[in-house]
Image (tube, rainbow, N blue to C red):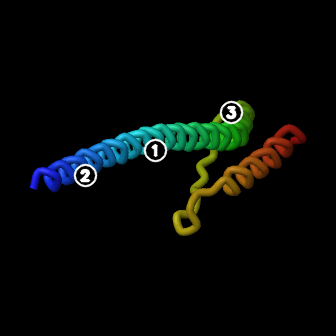
Amino acid sequence: DGAFNAHALAAQQGAFAMLESIDSIAQTSMNQARIAAAVIFFTVGFVALLIGALLAWGISEPVSRLSTDIQQMDEYNGILPEFIIPAARGFAIKDVAEAQRAFRKLLSGIRAF
């Protein structure tokens, strides 16, 4: 009976040692996964900020030129014309470009006159 208990005790200690080893490996893997998740999260965030900044810069330039054209036209005319963007079609960057071309044509016509 004593030999059986000694064998069971050795098996139990071996199982506990194996569980501690598995726990250590799991903790290491979890820490690596957390670090990888943080790196991926910050990388995606940085890329999103970069794309947002590039889009903002690309959109602000034509709008700024359009604003300058409107201000120049106001100097010639004294009043700003009202224009309405059709609600059914919605607002798009193409509308800004079309409005800018129209204002440039109108401005060149006023200058020629």
Type of the residue with mark 2: Ala
Mark 2 neighbour class, 10 Å CA radius: few under 14, some 14 to 19, many 20 or more: few
Q: In the figure, is residue 47 to the left or right of 62? A: left
In space, the residues marked 1 and 3 are separated at their CA atoms by: 56 Å
In space, the residues marked 1 and 2 are separated at their CA atoms by: 33 Å
Asked where in the image residue 107 lies, by quadrant, the reply is top right
Q: Residue at x 73, y 55 (%)?
A: 98
Q: Which tag is nearer the camera, tag 1 or tag 2?
A: 2
Which residue lies under the disc numbered 2?
11
Image quadrant in which the N terminus is located? bottom left
In space, the residues marked 2 and 3 are separated at their CA atoms by: 88 Å
Residue 57 on image: x %, y %: 68, 37
Mark 1 neighbour class, 10 Å CA radius: few under 14, some 14 to 19, many 20 or more: few
Asked where in the image residue 86 lies, by quadrant, the reply is bottom right
Secondary-structure class at tag 1: helix
Against 88, is 63 above or below? above
Q: In the figure, is residue 75 to the left or right of 23? A: right
- Is any part of residue 77 visible from this angle? no
Nearest the viewer among 1 and 54 is 1
Secondary-structure class at tag 3: helix
Mark sitting earlier along the chain (2/3): 2
Q: Which tag is nearer the camera, tag 1 or tag 3?
A: 1
Residue 21 on image: x %, y %: 36, 43
Q: Which mark is residue 71?
A: 3
- Is any part of residue 95 visible from this angle? yes
Nearest the viewer among 87 and 56 is 56
Secondary-structure class at tag 2: helix
Which residue lies under the disc numbered 1?
33
Type of the residue with mark 1: Ala
Q: Residue at x 47, y 40 (%)?
A: 32
Residue 17 on image: x %, y %: 30, 43
Image quadrant in which the C terminus is located? top right
